[in-house]
Image: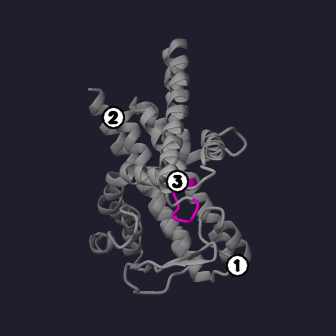
Amino acid sequence: MNPAAMLIAAALDLIVGDPRRLPHPVRWMGSLIAWLEEMLYPAKRSARAEFVRGMILCCCVVCATVAAAALFLTLCRRLSPVVAMAGEVIVGFYCLSARSLVHEATIVRKHLEAGDVPEARAALSMIVGRDTACLEEKDIVRATIETVAENITDGIVSPLLYLAVGGPLAAVAFKAVSTMDSMIGYKDDRYRRFGTFAARLDDALNFIPARISGFALIPLAAFVCRLDWKNAVRIVARDRLKHESPNAAHGEAALAGALSIRLGGGAWYEGEWCGRPYLGDDRRAVEVRDIGRAGRIALVTACVTVILACAAAAGIRR
């Protein structure tokens, strides 16, 4: 991808964030996934049928979104070089979500600072899959920090890496897979087999970015933010595999170490308790201000990743 286009796209994401009043390709992806799920989910359930049809859904979504993006970029290139660059900026912009991630976390923080726990629960429910109705303040803080940590990889590092290495179409393909994972990549009765292919593909695409985030980018951001970057490295080295996902614990462990707090420990999902190990050391109690600290780490990580990704893209173009 053109490094200048990537830089502009990232700057727009950090300044503007998710333009909710404008059409968003991720919402279109979500509508396509829901429609295909209704069409393909087998009436007579069997392990093989569910897995195969879930794989077909995944392939259809990726092919459709990449084809649409390719058509858009081709039309832009035929108009003029300036329009071609603008097209790359638009596609790159819609693949990133650093500002919206921090914004949603900030909404939760502001409700907690105002003492409005019910509103904080409601705001948290918009960005996590767990049950939030009975969470106490400390649990809301932990859940918010955990989703920030996980989305540092999903919404910042991975898209920028694919933009740099594979260009806009690679980033669009990643975004499609990530969206599918968030919609059907669950281990409940309905999606345990139907969403397996999408979940495993998402794991594969995030494998390298998660490790770059945990071992390098988040500790570097912690250093810039004057937090405990050494502890971040120590905790991610120790706790990175304490999760059923091969990737999720890398970011969470690094952020837990940087903040000198403990994350994880499980949560309720649709009335069912899902336990998992703790990440980090319980050096101190979590506090509302930790959400702001996590947000600053996310933004610094985004800035550092943009610089590195642009440098990588320039090197590839040469």
Q: Is residue 11 visible?
A: no
Mark 2 vs mark 3: give the one in front: 3
Callout 2 touching callout 3 (CB < 8 Å): no
In this figure, which residue is indicated by the disc labeled 1? 117
Three-letter amino acid code at the position of disc 3: Phe
Callout 3 touching callout 1 (CB < 8 Å): no
Q: Residues within 10 Å of mark 1 (few under 14, many from 20)?
A: many
Residue in the image at 46% along x and 55% along y: 196
In this figure, which residue is indicated by the disc labeled 3? 194
Residue in the image at 37% along x and 79% along y: 280
186 inside magenta stretch: yes
Residue 66's spot in the image, x, y percent? 50, 32
The label shown at residue 313 is: 2
Residue 20's spot in the image, x, y percent? 69, 46
Marks 2 and 1, how far apart at CA: 44 Å
Quadrant placement of the C terminus: top left
Task: Specify start and end residues of the magenta stretch as a single range.
Answer: 182-190
Q: Is residue 259 left or right of residue 138?
A: left
- Find numbered disc 1 in the image and state the secondary structure of the residue it sits on: helix
Residue in the image at 45% along x and 43% along y: 174
Q: Which of the pair 23/29 is nearer the observer?
A: 29
Q: Which of the pair 201/314 is nearer the observer?
A: 201
251 inside magenta stretch: no
- Find numbered disc 2 in the image and state the secondary structure of the residue it sits on: helix
Q: Residue 127 is drawn in which quadrant? A: bottom right
